Amino acid sequence: LQMCIIGLGIAILIPQAVDRGGGFTAIKTGFSGFSGMYGNLFDAHVAYSFGITVTIGLMSGPVGDQQHWQRAFAFQEGKVFHGYLLAAVIFAMVPLTMSLPGFIAAGNPGAAPAVSAGNIAAQQVGPEVIRTLLPQWGMIVFMIMILSGLASTGDSALCAGGSLVAVDIWQKYICPGASDQQALRMARFAVLGIALTAVGISLIPGVTILSLFLFYGTLRSATLMPTLVILFRKAVPSWGIFWGVALAIVFGLPLYLVGELSGNIHLKVCANIAILVISLTLPVISVLTGKNKM
């Protein structure tokens, strides 16, 4: 239902925005960014400063994110690959079409004057283009569409978080004899706590959606390489996985935060690569030594 709402919203809004914003001529001009600051769509600086971090974060999602594993477990046996492949193909229309308002704004400054003037952040370019080019009802449709997308991801994340707290931590280590009903109650408390924490983080002054997205991607990238090692190598000593993830977070995450706060792109890229290297090295060492001691 949520995907249908998103698809319907895209079908209603994007063609009109493209038509009123200058058509494909504006989109093509926008490939060079605002005021032509980039040479082309595949500008090396963008690929280095933004692409590496985002790619690592997005690749880490399906591998190291608990909500994706819960989706995989929900499939019938033997249908996981085809299900994920079909889902990727269907969802591809969202980033491909929702990127068009950004290119329109870059190619036609009048499509998003507030962004062009620097009055609002560039990450708000989508709703700004819709607000500028379309009637007032366009923003209503846009917000319903965005809420559907957020709810689709949000409920999966809350479910995964509740399961991790109630089953993998509370029921396994704190209260091993707890019944499923008690675990369900604990999961509900966990979901409430996670939701309140998320709201609190979103209300921190100066925090942007983009910075949260990049931070989250950097954090979960610590689980990418250890998970791949587990998938392709049996009986990996637990200490290698534990210390690989822990040290990657302890050393890599503060390095990334310093780079983010100081605006040092090189530091941010190095932090992401360091997280991958550290989280891979320890599991490999544990496999080579063959010792399963913490």
Image (spheres, helix red, strand yellow):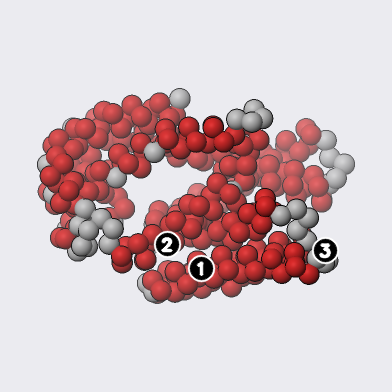
Q: Which residue is at a point 31% across and 65% down the rendered structure image?
A: 44
* Dot 2 alpha-carbon crowd within 10 angstroms: few under 14, some 14 to 19, many 20 or more: some
Kindly identify the amino acid type of the residue bearing the numbered disc 3: Asn
Q: Of label 1 and label 3, which has the lower sequence position?
A: 1
Label 2 sits on residue: 52
In the picture of the structure, the residue carrying the numbered disc 1 is 273
Q: From what the image shows, is residue 268 above or below residue 31?
A: below
* Near-viewer residue (169 or 11): 11
Quadrant in the picture for the N terminus: top left
- Give the x, y percent position of residue 82: 54, 32
Q: Nearer the viewer, residue 234 or 144?
A: 234
- Among the two numbered marks 3 and 2 on one chain, the one whose residue lies closer to the N terminus: 2
Residue at 51% x, 41% y is 154
- What's the residue at 44%, 69% (across, down)? 269
The three-letter code of the residue at mark 1 reads: Ile
Confirm or deny contact between disc 2 and disc 1 (CB under 8 A).
yes
- As helix, strand or loop, the secondary structure at mark 2 comes to helix
Q: Is residue 234 left or right of residue 80?
A: right
Disc with the residue nearer the chain's start (2 vs 1): 2
Q: Which residue is mark 3?
A: 292
SS label for mark 1: helix
The extreme right residue here reads: 177
User: Residue drawn at (78%, 32%), measured in percent from left and top?
Assistant: 181
